[in-house]
Image (tube, helix red, strand yellow):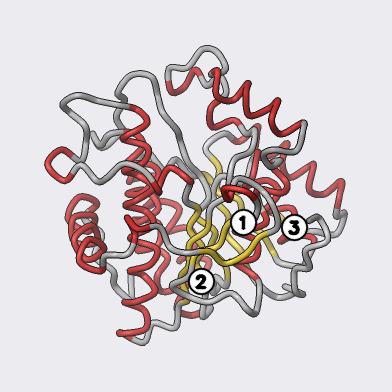
Amino acid sequence: MSTFTVPDLSGRLAVVTGGSDGVGFHLAARLAAAGAEVVLPVRNRSKGEAAVARILERTPHATVTLRDLDLSSLSSVAALGATLRDENRPVHLLVNNAGVMTPPERRTTADGFELQFGSNHLGHFALVAHLLPLLRAGGARVTSQLSVAANQGTINWDDLNWERNYKGQSAYSQSKIAFGLFGLELDRRSQAAGWGITSNIAHPGVAPTNLLAARPEVGRRNDTLGVRLIRVLSRVGLTGTPESAALPALLAATSPDARGGRFYGPSGLGHLSGAPAEQEIYSRLRSPEDAARIWEISENLTGMPFLAERS
């Protein structure tokens, strides 16, 4: 699977969220190796600097720069959007990869949203809205990273912020369903309005990343049983690795054959690992009515309507 060929991306500007480790790091590294100039918006500068150093070890002539971004803060998202718009460079590839998973106790963003819904979905929604003029200028492809969790659970329409009866896994599934609906709706709206953007969705299967590892910032002091099991399964080849798990989004973002409004994931048993390929869209993501509903709600919650021009 490491032989997946990424086309020449020389002269292209790629923005990858969550690129400081795990799947996002491998996405960024492969894009840089293919000649793209890669922008890594990161929450933790030291981790970002370490990631840039690792990429340059692999590809000494790569061009990778850091920007600051905390997806759990709409003001941070706005600041990144303003910075990139001031630089006024068309964005050709945007991979919305960053995410947070299953805090054991309910936590909220700086703006009061449940952390997973606010970061995984609303933060990225606002980022795309802020970057819309640059994405249009670049005729961009936007790839949004989901999870197998988007194939379970539902959107808790009556309590999107899980103020009652918080369940970490259910809230995580909701965030990824909402994000998937958005990714597909973005493609539909781009086609209808002539934005020139192609939007698709992907999922990495299952791999041992830091999503379920010890993360004090989300209230998890120790590795979960889940990530310990996934590490064992990965070693014997039953689940993927962070490198192989990056391939579906890499294909979705770069392949000339990848199309808007489509879903890409691993093609192996249970879609947990294996070579990247198009797959059937999860049932929870197929309703245009649900997609339009979450779009409108997201615009209202973030205060970010999609405008072609922003100052």
Mark closest to the chain's N terminus, 3 or 1: 3
Which element carries disc 1, helix, strand or loop? strand
x and y percentages locating residue 284 in the rendered image: 32, 55
How would you rate the neighbour count of disc 1 (Cα within 10 Å): few for under 14, some for 14-19, many for 20 or more?
Answer: many
Mark closest to the chain's N terminus, 2 or 3: 3
x and y percentages locating residue 87 in the rendered image: 53, 66
From the image, tell me which residue sits under label 3: 30
Q: Amino acid at mark 2?
A: Asn
Q: Quadrant of the N terminus?
A: bottom right
Q: Is residue 257 visible?
A: yes
- Residue 109, quarter of picture: top left
How would you rate the neighbour count of disc 2 (Cα within 10 Å): few for under 14, some for 14-19, many for 20 or more?
Answer: few
From the image, tell me which residue sits under label 2: 88
Which element carries disc 2, helix, strand or loop? loop
Q: Is residue 238 above or below residue 217?
A: below
Q: Amino acid at mark 1?
A: Val
Q: Are marks 2 and 3 in contact (CB under 8 Å)?
A: no
How would you rate the neighbour count of disc 3 (Cα within 10 Å): few for under 14, some for 14-19, many for 20 or more?
Answer: many
- Residue 305, quarter of picture: bottom left
Q: Nearer the viewer, residue 17 or 187?
A: 187
**Mark carried by residue 39:** 1
Q: Is residue 157 left or right of residue 13?
A: left
Q: CA distance from mark 1 to mark 2?
A: 14 Å
